[in-house]
Amino acid sequence: MSLDTLIADTSQALADDATKGHVVFRAQGTLVGVTEVDISTGRHTFKVDEPPALGGADVAANPVQFALASLGSCQAITYRLWAARLGVELDSVTVRVEGDLDLRGFFGVGDEARPGLTAIRLEVDVAGPESQERYAELAAAVDEHCPVLDLFRNPVPVSRALHVADAAGNPADR
């Protein structure tokens, strides 16, 4: 099935029944070292770690790097999808993402520093035969529809439940 057919069929199915648009993604992380975490997202598994300067062994990218990689990869995919949807010929896409983090927030040193990213710089290089205006139209569509960019730009409600177990792994009384 071609990308154009997939986009058309999926768009029509979502237009016909909005409930088909709701999906749930899951990830689970288990601390297996000082800062090393094994992540499972269903069929896929990977590690996350911190560099030695933050107490880790640097066996994998750190959580902030994964967040930036998520943004960059989502941008690239969204460029491909929206190029097909808008009929914009796209030969290649390269996305670079940089983020600023003030470690004082993570370590609780100084109330003025937040623990998260304070700025993100996103650079996208596209190649193809279209005009600058067509690629600007594509970029605007991507900025409007990229799920991970939306995640960075807009607050998302987060709920957290804490479950405490004893040393043997038995749930504590609730």
Image (tube, rainbow, N blue to C red):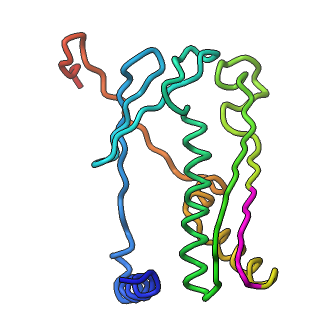
Number of callouts: 0
Residue 56 inside the magenta-drawn segment: no
Picture quarter containing residue 63?
top right
In the image, 31: left or right of 74? left
Viewer-proximal residue among 155 and 81: 81
Percent position of residue 72, x then y: 61, 54
Viewer-proximal residue among 59 and 40: 59
Quadrant of the rendering where the N terminus is positioned: bottom left
Percent position of residue 74, x then y: 56, 60
* Residue at 79% in and 27% down: 112
**174 over 68 or under it: above or below:** above
Q: Is the magenta stretch mostly helix, strand or loop?
A: strand
Quadrant of the rendering where the C terminus is positioned: top left
Residue 124 inside the magenta-drawn segment: yes
* Residue at 30% in and 22% down: 164
**8 over 69 or under it: above or below:** below
* Residue at 55% in and 51% down: 70
Residue that protrudes farthest toward the top in the picture? 167
First to last magenta residue range: 123-130
Picture quarter containing residue 8?
bottom left
* Residue at 44% in and 23% down: 36
**24 over 159 or under it: above or below:** below
Residue that protrudes farthest toward the right in the picture? 132
Percent position of residue 33, x then y: 41, 17
In the image, 34: left or right of 74? left
Picture quarter containing residue 34?
top left
